[in-house]
Amino acid sequence: MKLATPIMRIETLIRMKEATGREKDREAVRQLSQLLENADDAQ
């Protein structure tokens, strides 16, 4: 049995984590936002 890996845009994941309002997701949002910003700067 082969498991598929779901793929989504980082922006979508950030919005989903923001919507939860959980403290651990706030930190994840901060880290994901930094990754996204660094990726934009590299282009």
Image (tube, grey):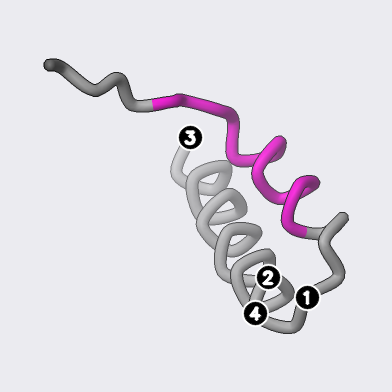
| Residue 43 painted magenta | no
- The kind of residue tagged 3 is Gln
Disc 2 on helix, strand or loop?
A: helix
Determine contact: label 4, label 2, CB under 8 Å: yes
From mark 4 to mark 2, how far is it between C-alphas? 4 Å
Q: Write down the residue under mark 1.
A: 22
Determine contact: label 1, label 2, CB under 8 Å: yes
From mark 4 to mark 1, how far is it between C-alphas? 6 Å
Determine contact: label 2, label 3, CB under 8 Å: no
Determine contact: label 4, label 1, CB under 8 Å: yes
The mark found on residue 24 in the picture is: 4
| Residue 12 painted magenta | yes
- The kind of residue tagged 4 is Lys
- Highlighted magenta segment, given as a residue range: 6-17
Q: Where is residue 19 in the image (x, y as percent from the top left)?
A: 87, 55
Q: Write down the residue under mark 3.
A: 43
Q: Position of residue 8 (x, y in %)?
A: 55, 28
Q: Write down the residue under mark 2.
A: 25
From mark 3 to mark 1, how far is it between C-alphas? 32 Å
Q: Quadrant of residue 25?
A: bottom right
- The kind of residue tagged 2 is Asp
